[in-house]
Amino acid sequence: MLLTRLHVLWCLVCRIVEGGWQEFLYRVVLLLVLCCFLLLRVPYIFGMSGFAVFLFVFVFPLFLALFVSRMSVEGISKFCAGLIPDGTPVWIAPFVCLTESLSYLVRPVVLLIRPFVNLTIGAMGGFVIGLLTLETWWVILFLFILFFYEVFVALVHWFIVCSILSFSEKH
């Protein structure tokens, strides 16, 4: 079999996504999130408000579905017990449960806000620096480097989304 760079990249993406539900639909949604994170780097695809709506419509329901399924399958007592690590002293267990519950509730907010803020700042910064291209020629080289940096940031945030969803499924 001919081993191409695209095939190696595809295998890498599949291995990252594989930690989840092991279902085709889950992979499709995560790859859709990856494509949207990358397409944000291309001018005139969709704006920041569209990206915020995309995050709220696609990513937040994934986390909410995990939360509801864990609550319905395991029940509230097993769900709360799953938040407390093994070996926790009994006298501190309620505080650990409270802290982990707050962490569990804050996680989707961070999941939505972090990519939005970072990618918005990158897009706006690139736009402002792009206005300087009429002044000097070296700005184009800097914008080229900035573009690849922003693509890297989008890939990192996609990996964070996958990791948080995978962690939320297991815990």
Image (spheres, rainbow, N blue to C red):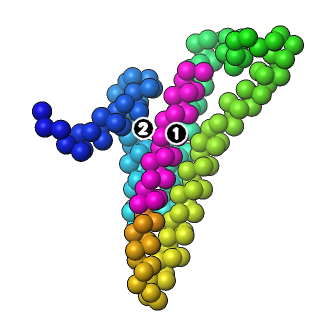
Which picture quadrant has residue 23?
top left
For residue 118, say whether it is visible. yes
- On screen, residue 149 above or below 4: below
Label 1 with label 2: CB-CB less than 8 Å: yes
Horizontal arrangement in the rendering, residue 25 relative to residue 121 (left or right): left
Quarter assignment of residue 71: top right
Q: Going 44% across and 26% down the picture, which residue do you hit?
A: 19
Residue sitting nearer the eye, 110 or 151 = 151
> In the image, is 147 to the left or to the right of 90?
left
> Tag 2: residue type?
Leu
Evaluate whether residue 80 shows in this view.
no
What number is the disc on residue 161? 1
Q: Which mark is residue 30?
A: 2
Q: Position of residue 168 (x, y in %)?
A: 58, 27
Q: Residue furthest left?
A: 1
Determine the image quadrant of residue 8: top left
Which numbered disc flags the more N-terminal residue, 1 or 2? 2
